[in-house]
Amino acid sequence: MAPAKILIIEDETAVRTLILRFLTKQGFQVEAAEDGKTGMSSFEKFKPDLVILDVNLPDTTGYALCNDMQGRTGVFVLMLTSRDDEADKIEGFKQGADDYITKPFGLSELGARVGAILKRQRTVTAAEQQCLEYQGLSIDPIRREVSLNDEMVPLTALEFDLLHFLASHPGRVWRRAELIQEVWDYDYVGDQRVVDVHIGQIRKKIEIDTSQPSLIQTVRGVGYKFEAMTAEEAAAEEAAGT
Ligand code: CA
């Protein structure tokens, strides 16, 4: 398998060089840029699997870049923030970041996060490759595409993984910690509200009424479950004239 491609966008030379050297040594194919403009042009040519993105850049913010990149591809994004501020992290997740790391950080921690994110890119098994078809909602794990009533729904990589995971186990209730373990794929030590933020973003995109969500339901005091009729069940119900 070809080594994963990682793009670093960070204006602090010392930090950028450190990450570049570390990841190159780990065997990744790495490019680096020092501002948003150079970063975006490198993003288009290099087509990275993962972007390590600093929040504060001289010509733009990491949030804006993240949003822009996620609108083009299903790239993974790891945000670098120097402010240990909950609001910043939530903002990053809303713009499609998969994870964040707070400066100053150790290289081993960075390596672990990068490894965990890239693991999600693993080849899917035959059972996981099956397209999930629910009433009006179609989830294609190979193309990583979701459509609702035949209209494409733009989801970030993490939103897709979360929705696909829930929809693969309809009716089952998941605790937040379980979802983090299954979807984020590592022992996340931060705030479990990250799950709520991502569920909220998915709901905005697939639920007709976000105040009365029907597909992803909140189970009070526990977590979340996916509940929907399969396409066959919906057709049978229609045929029965109910
Ligand atoms: Ca910076």
Image (tube, rainbow, N blue to C red):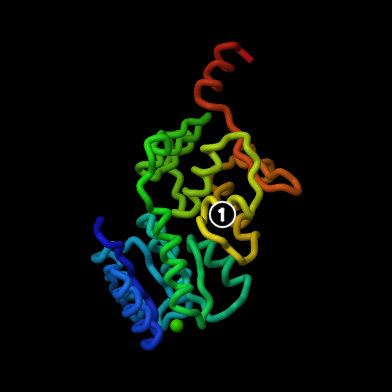
For image coordinates 60% across by 77% down, the residue present is 84
Mark 1 is surrounded, within 10 Å at the Cα level, by few (under 14), some (14 to 19) or many (20 or more) other residues, namely few
Find residue 156 and report its image quarter: bottom left
Rendered view: 161 above or below 226: below
Residue type beneath disc 1: Gln
Q: Nearer the viewer, residue 152 or 219?
A: 219
The front one of 152 and 131 is 131
Q: Residue at x 55, y 21 (%)?
A: 233
Q: Quadrant of residue 145?
A: top left
- What residue is shown at x 57% (from left), y 27% (from top)? 229
Where disc 1 sits, the SS reads: helix
**Residue 112, how many percent across, how many down?**
45, 68
Residue farthest to the bottom, as pictured: 14
Residue 5 in the image: x percent, y percent?
Answer: 30, 65
Relative to 22, residue 5 above or below: above
Q: Looking at the rendering, in which quadrant would you find the N terminus?
A: bottom left
Quadrant housing the C terminus: top right
Residue 76 image point, x, y percent: 41, 60
Q: Is residue 117 visible?
A: yes
Give the labeled residue for mark 1: 181
- Which residue extends farthest top? 240
Mark 1 close to ligand 1, CB under 8 Å: no
Quadrant in the picture for residue 195: bottom right
- Ligand 1 shown in quarter: bottom left
Task: Tell me which residue sits at (51%, 77%) in the image.
Answer: 81
Apparent side of residue 31 relative to residue 168 in the rendered image (left or right):
left
Residue 45, horizontal then vertical, whole percent: 24, 65
| Left or right, residue 137 beside residue 222 | left
In this picture, residue 182 sits left or right of residue 218: left
Query: Do we see residue 61 in this rendering?
Result: no
Q: Is residue 185 left or right of residue 144?
A: right
Q: Looking at the image, which is closer to me, 242 or 167?
A: 167
